[in-house]
Amino acid sequence: MKYLGVDGCKGGWISACYGSGEILIFRNIEELVSHYQDEFLMFVDIPIGLASAKNKKRNCEKEARKLLSAKRKSSIFPVPCWESLEGQNYEDAKGINRKVLGCGISKQTWFIMPKIKEVNSLLIDNRSLQSVIKESHPEISFKYLNLGIPLGHSKKTEKGIIERLEILTKYKQSSPAIFHKALQTYRKKEVAKDDILDALCLSVTAELSEKYGRSVPLRPMTDEFGIEMAINYATGL
């Protein structure tokens, strides 16, 4: 079994796999899935399972924010509805979302909507993948890898990078070597330092989830296509 941590990045998608010791970048999610042809479990930092006019409830974000400190709550932002993914521009998508769900969308949400559509469309077209591609969130995952203790620094700072790398090293001693190799392999315009750390975090979390898995909400709902709506994480050792 390969335990994959996946995050969006400027170059497309970054995938971390401790089993192979690899950090790889793929242009699209289909290319990533095709590369890992063998059995795998993937935790990805992207909303999976969306509200829509037919099914307006998605409560993952509301529940997940309760798990984070006041400083970190903003890392979990509102998720767009299915219909808004067809918006031709930001204002169009925001208007559609407001009509369907009664609220707009942020620019941050708009920028990742192509990736949201990419992953969710893949799961609709390939239903067998729904059991092995799961939504997760690095801020929640890092907190629980840190035994439930909130992290002290932003992942965008040098102290935050050191803090997160130290947490990962407690679980996987190869973490510093894999991290620094990725920095030497890929350019800044392809992937940021925190993207690498987030992917590594989700790889560890995916593996731990086999025994210590949790989700918010505890009893997930499904969207109109039957896709589970839950943010998955794992308690630390």
Image: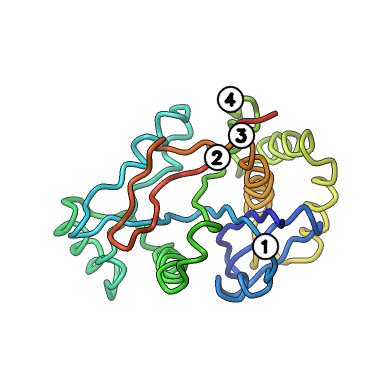
Q: Nearer the viewer, mark 1 or mark 4?
A: 1
Judged left or right of residue 210, residue 228 is: left
- Identify the residue position indicated by label 4 in the image: 148
Q: Nearer the viewer, residue 15 or 228?
A: 228
Mark found first going from the N terminus, 2 or 4: 4
Q: Earlier in the sequence, mark 4 or mark 3?
A: 4
Which residue is depicted at the point 38% across and 50% down? 229
Task: Measure how far apart labels 2 and 4 are at the Cα level.
Answer: 11 Å
Q: Residue at x 53, y 58 (%)?
A: 133
Frontmost residue, 114 versus 187 = 114
What residue is pinned by disc 3?
Answer: 212
User: Could you tell me residue 47's position as x and y percent?
Assistant: 42, 54
| Callout 2 touching callout 1 (CB < 8 Å) | no
Q: Estimate the x, y position of residue 67 in percent, counting from the top left.
A: 46, 29
Disc 2 residue type (three-letter): Tyr
Q: Earlier in the sequence, mark 2 or mark 3?
A: 3
**First-in-chain label (3 vs 1):** 1
Residue where numbered disc 2 is placed: 233
Q: Earlier in the sequence, mark 1 or mark 4?
A: 1
**Which percent across, then down, holds residue 75?**
46, 42
Is residue 213 shown left or right of residue 23?
left
Q: Residues within 10 Å of mark 3 (few under 14, many from 20)?
A: some
Q: Could you tell me the amino acid type at mark 1?
A: Glu
Q: Quadrant of the rendered structure where residue 164 is?
A: top right
Q: Secondary structure at mark 4?
A: loop
Residue at 63 percent of width and 42 percent of height = 210
SS state under label 3: helix
SS at badge 1: loop
Whether residue 187 is situated above or below residue 203 in the rendered picture: below
Q: Which mark is residue 39?
A: 1
Point out the image quarter for the C terminus: top right
